[in-house]
Amino acid sequence: MPYMSIIPIRAAVLRTPGRPLKIERLEMEGPRDDEVLVRVVASGICHTDIDFCQSGGSGPVVLGHEGAGVVERIGKAAKGIKPGDHVVLSYQSCGHCRPCRTGHPADCQRFWEANFGFARLDGTNALHGGVRGHFFGQSSFATHALITMRNLVKVPKSLPLELLAPLGCGMQTGAGTVMNSLAVRAGSSVAVFGAGSVGLAAVMAARIVKAKTIIAVDLNDSRLKLARELGATHSINNRWSDLAGSIKAITGGGVDYIVESTADHDMEQSAAELLNPDGKAALLSGASAPGRLPGGRQVLSVIQGDAVPQKFIPNLIKLYQEGRFPFDRLVKFYDFTQINRAIADSKQGATVKPVLRISNEGNVR
Ligand SMILES: [Zn+2]
Ligand SMILES: [Zn+2]
């Protein structure tokens, strides 16, 4: 009989959409040959988690997709990692399709099922008791996560894991959209719609690539103030101001690049209308984008900033260490038991990036 270990874990379970998450004791299978068991130290909360809390999965699920932790156990086929290593968890991809094989895992043909299928790609689920996991290949609102080498990024032990957690989705998406998807040029103009964690990561990245004009757009003045501190040269509160008129007053026309992170339909429409000729806009909501428009303009639908996590996240860590990507300014920490409060604070805009402290970095269970 094959040996199969069972790991007792605690996880925040969504049982009814719209209702609070409840921390429950569950059992999880130990790692398969290609899997790695990680003790989760911290997890960021991202808007996709919050959207699922409202809309629900199919039956009880464990969310969370910005985990960071310590490797506890590795499957026989997992290479280049050992127990005790520190890791940041990112999105999952299949590793076999053409985009995966050519270095574009964010375009994985099985992206949807690998990240939102609440199962391994073979359809199995490691959680027992009728609860489904494997959200983004991790389900990090839990004391332990089963991941693979494809969504694991080894990180230096010199930085606290609880700080690094949000790099796996929100920071990567915002910065990757500017640096990879749009490839923003030095001296250009960029507007960032939405000054949440993704938008603010885009603002910091626009400053790194030396955009000349960086315009942050949001409904919340305190977030706009933070955007200016992080590199925005201008800000527009579109609750009170006319967006097109304000942009024209700043640039004399449109903008060269737009990062649309609000998922608001009118803002997505505006993104197409406010571009300069040959300009590019990125929609981050998953909405289908028109692609090419008159005048050489392009509107793209972007996932995870087209980033390869194992390359991009170490780069963000280096920029942070150089003081050029101060994403720690966005983070507020909560105990794991305060998860529902952290979600409420994020929804109300009081916290930009909530991070849950789930266990200590030291070897405790
Ligand atoms: Zn996310
Ligand atoms: Zn793939």
Image (cartoon, rainbow, N blue to C red):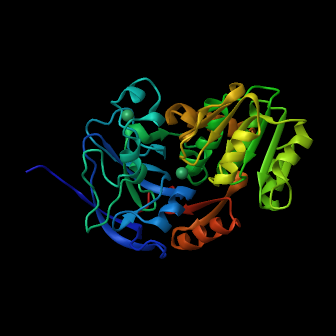
Q: Quadrant of residue 218?
A: bottom right
Residue at horizontal 71 percent and vertical 67 percent from the top: 350
The tally of labels here is 0
In depth, the one of 15 and 9 nearer the eye is 15
Q: Where residue 160 appears, x then y in whole percent?
A: 59, 50
In the figure, is residue 358 to the left or right of 1?
Answer: right
Can residue 227 be seen at all in this image of the molecule?
yes
Residue at horizontal 46 percent and vertical 61 percent from the top: 141
Q: Where residue 259 appears, x then y in whole percent?
A: 69, 41
Q: Quadrant of residue 184?
A: top right
In depth, the one of 88 and 115 nearer the eye is 115
Q: Is residue 280 above or below residue 2?
A: above
In depth, the one of 332 and 200 nearer the eye is 200
Residue at horizontal 63 percent and vertical 63 percent from the top: 333
Q: Please identify the residue farthest to the left as the structure is shown.
A: 1
In depth, the one of 196 and 82 nearer the eye is 196
Can residue 327 be seen at all in this image of the molecule?
no
